[in-house]
Amino acid sequence: MRLYELPYFLSLTKNSSRFQRLMFKLNESNPGACNDILEMMMTYSYRAPEFADRVRDFAYESEVRLFRGDNMNVVPMLKALSMIGHFVSQQLTRLRRLITRIDDHANDRDEAMDWMRSELDVLLCDECGEWEYSDMLRDTYGGNDVCRSCIDDAYVYLGRYDQYVYSDSVITALDEDGDRTEIHCDDPNFMWHDGLDIRAHVDYEYEPPEPEVIASYHSSKGRFRFQRDDWTAIHKRFLGVELEVEMADRYAETKAKAQQLNELINDGEVGSKVFFERDGSLTNGFEIISHPQSLPAHREMWTWLQDKAATKGLISHKSTSCGLHVHVNRDSLTKLQIAKMVAFVNNPDNKEFMTALARRYGELSGYCRIKQGNAKVKKPESSDRYEAVNVTPTKTIEFRIFKGTLKYESLVAALEFVHALCEYTARCGDCSVSDLGYESFLKFAETKLPKETKTLLTYVNNRLETV
């Protein structure tokens, strides 16, 4: 149809109903001509506004037929709807219904789908397979195009990629600066970091923090290393020390002092020889805890106490809160030995000796209580961990009777005493309580263990003379 024939065509269809019927018939017989008429009418609608009215009427009726009819040529109808801007605000659910209808009932299905893809700019969602306007599809990590509904249900936006990522694929990692961020689990720029127990960016330069010198109470448990040598092989015995110290100035900084000692004793490597721990019984101080090791190894390690610069600013003996605790491994002792050791320390006849050695005795309360009455040789059972000899640990026996010290001789004397008492109670046979006296013990040490008790004998004898 030529342009000059349009007025004549409209004159034959003076009302919309007749025009629509004519157009629908034309669409069935010659859809191409129907398309041409619609396009020419809209092109020249500025000359005759009634052209646009006729197209609008045809478009509205077309939408009804599109949802109700079968075996139709739908392209002209779609074009009519598009010409009046119907698809600009078309709801997505209605558009999907329309596409389903076209897919099931249109004679020109392939042409219609091509037209909708190009003219309406719609695509299939790669997630759910539904149709969506292209400008509403979202680009996701991995290159899939996903509709609004799927984005809302199962995706999150990650600024790192400027893309949406499937929620179940999002994990936490460390970025280039070590800050926590969210990433896709398959991002090749992030690798598992054993030291951090998390994925980290390949460009992140991890610098392990310096370990805290003074750690929390009992934090060294499970970190002890048995320092074996010829002495431990012969005696099957390991000794451990807990030395409590306070700052002489109650307001002084403990960290700096612990760092100084860590450099001196551990060569800067926390725990290589001793650990430093906080203790609730101390006002402004810390514990110095050794690994289980031999008596000779202790003699060598604690020589730092002879360095005045090392002990400057610390107190232990002069503090009312500090103690010196010596542990010995339980598996090297029999129950009878343990009972005898408890009896020896608690024997009132040994008070003078124990006071000279431990520099305290007879405390009924606090952290190293003495049992009252005659201690008899029996099963050494007790639930009180604050007794002078603490038998509650499962792997060690703890001698808590000693007062804290910063003197090398008094600390080594305590270690030699524990070792000598283990030997004495093992060799004294079926001795009675009266036989567990300090005089027989000293005689045993002098004759049987002179080299292993040299510091103890000198220290105790000198103090007994002054007590």
Image: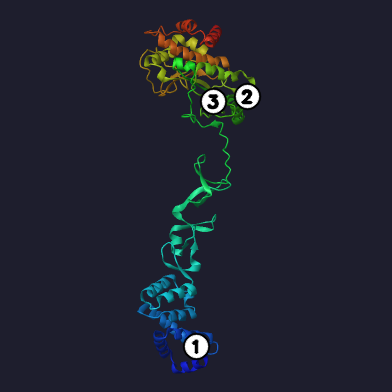
Disc number placed over residue 34 in the picture, else none: none
Quadrant housing the C terminus: top right
Colour basis: rainbow
Q: Measure how far apart labels 3 and 1 are at the Cα level.
A: 98 Å
Mark closest to the chain's N terminus, 3 or 1:
1
Label 2 Cα neighbours within 10 Å, binned few <14 / some 14-19 / many ≥20 = some
Disc number placed over residue 313 in the picture, else none: 2
Please say if the residues under marks 3 and 2 sit with CB atoms less than 8 Å apart. no
In the image, residue 261 sits, relative to residue 362, either above or below, namely: below
Label 3 Cα neighbours within 10 Å, binned few <14 / some 14-19 / many ≥20 = many
Tell me the amino acid under the disc marked 2: Gly
Rendering coords of residue 48 (x, y %): 53, 90
Tell me the amino acid under the disc marked 1: Phe
Q: Mark 3 points at which residue?
A: 274
Q: Name the residue under label 1.
A: 51
**Mark 2 residue element:** loop
**Mark 3 residue element:** strand
Tell me the amino acid under the disc marked 3: Val
